Image: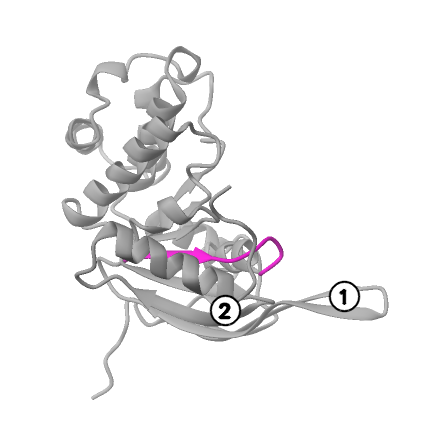
Amino acid sequence: MTRQHYIEVRDLVKNYDTGKVRVSAVDHVSFYVDQGEFIGIMGASGSGKTTMLNILSTIDTMSAGQVFYDGADIAGMNEEELSDFRQRNLGFVFQDYNLLDTLTIEENIMLPMALCSKKKEEIVSRIQSISESLHIGDILRKFPYEVSGGQKQRAACARALVNNPKLILADEPTGALDSKSSDMLLHTFQVMNRELGATILMVTHDVFSACYCERILFLSDGRICAELERGNEGKREYLNRILDVQSQIGGEDISA
């Protein structure tokens, strides 16, 4: 019997027509994500990593191929079904936080549950549990402009987790943070993954961020050209292997 993966991408294609030229941003990509994995996607600018993330998040459509979540093919869903699917199954962490300044941190976190019409008691209990795990319980009553960038990003992580999504999609989540806040966020991702059971797919150009991932897919010209698994390696050895692959595929300087 064939094993069913949590998320399965089959022969994914995304083409853009620019005048008389057709550009393949994603070119027949196939991979899987199992429940509880923390996977990184790396590649130079223009390699197709963000386009692929947008398709997986149902924000963009595919030109060809299939994407399955727990056996359900998103290509067959209409707009209403896709909207409902996003709310119930996906969590998002962006580089610029995307918190609403007119809402408190607590209200920002509860928003996905409120949109799904969850009961007040369930919302309160869930927010208390997540905020304690991510060490933001003391800022729940504050507004985004009253807290640091690192605290905003942890609040964004809490919002992403609050509905127990099948998958958390993170697009360059450390891009707007200093090194200390980046380390804290990546540790938060580890807590989300190892202690809270979150499945995470993170797009990053940063080798130090990638070291936190258990598996990394490397994209070049819209195709997966390499894959690394950390296994039992130490952080320094893993980092060196990532740099080796990056240099072999001719990517940009990801340590910058």
Decide which of 254, 145 is in the foreground and name it.
254
Q: CA distance from mark 1 to mark 2?
A: 21 Å
Q: Locate residue 96, reporting x and y percent.
A: 49, 32
Q: Nearer the viewer, mark 1 or mark 2?
A: 1
Q: Residue furthest right?
A: 20
Q: Locate residue 244, reporting x and y percent.
A: 42, 62
Image-based side of 17 in relation to 74, left or right: right
Q: Locate residue 136, reporting x and y percent.
A: 24, 22
The residue wearing badge 1 is 17
Q: Secondary structure at mark 1?
A: strand
Q: Locate residue 46, reporting x and y percent.
A: 62, 57
- Its colouring scheme is one colour
Q: Give the extent of the magenta segment.
A: 38-47
Q: Residue at x 42, y 27 (%)?
A: 178
Residue 98 seen by the camera: yes
Residue 8 seen by the camera: no
The residue wearing badge 2 is 75
Looking at the rendered structure, the kind of residue marked 1 is Asp
